Amino acid sequence: DIEVECPPDKNIVGQSGWALLHTMAAHYPDKPSEECKKIHQKFIQSFSRVYPCKSCASHFRYMMKNQPPELENREKLSIWMCNMHNEVNKMLMKPVFSCDMQSLDERWRKAEPPCNSFID
Ligand code: FAD
């Protein structure tokens, strides 16, 4: 079992939030259907409205206005997400992560999705 401080603070919500977003991108299809793109677009927009740190959510929406989500394929979405995270890392003076697919897959992709019910 994973022990998570309860209730979670901003850092735990942040780590969990990024884990969800990067894992989702890591298992996004190489050739997504239009429906799949639409669902992910809506999810990312909604995420940026419901994320329970208001200043973080607002900053995420601001970044997305300048760099809208790239939903064409798995590689584009994974790299876009990595760039978003790096913008936050820079703001918080944390190290930036290499946004090449090998580094991203090593960190975030298992051979099979954590649950095999992804829509494509
Ligand atoms: P995290 O930044 O949470 O990273 C977790 C792990 O992800 C790292 O250990 C590393 O293995 C991996 N990683 C790091 N960078 C990347 C990358 N670029 N691509 C792929 N993997 C990577 N906090 C604020 O204080 N202000 C904000 O405005 C803010 N905005 C946020 C916006 C969003 C959408 C999210 C999800 C979180 C935001 N946070 C914000 C939280 C912040 O980003 C961190 O999650 C938090 O500070 C904890 O940092 P951490 O050092 O534990 O690692």
Image (cartoon, helix red, strand yellow):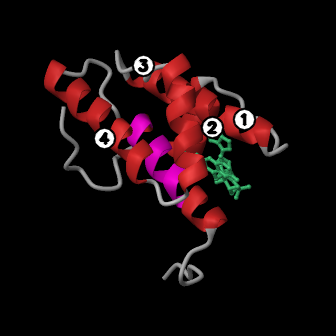
- CA–CA distance in space, label 4 to label 1: 24 Å
Residue 110 in sight: no
Q: What span is colored magenta in the figure?
A: 16-25
How many callouts does the rendering have?
4
Does residue 70 appear to the left or right of 14 in the view shown? Answer: left
The answer to which of 38 and 60 lies nearer the viewer is 60
- Residue marked by disc 2: 85
- CA–CA distance in space, label 2 to label 4: 17 Å
Which is more N-terminal, label 2 or label 3? 3
Residue pictured at 49% horizontal, 22% vertical: 65
Instruction: Name the disc covering residue 70, or none.
Output: 3
Which is more N-terminal, label 4 or label 2? 4
The amino acid pointed to by label 3 is Glu
Instruction: Name the disc covering residue 43, or none.
Output: 4
The amino acid pointed to by label 4 is Phe
- CA–CA distance in space, label 2 to label 1: 8 Å
Identify the element where label 3 is drawn.
Answer: loop
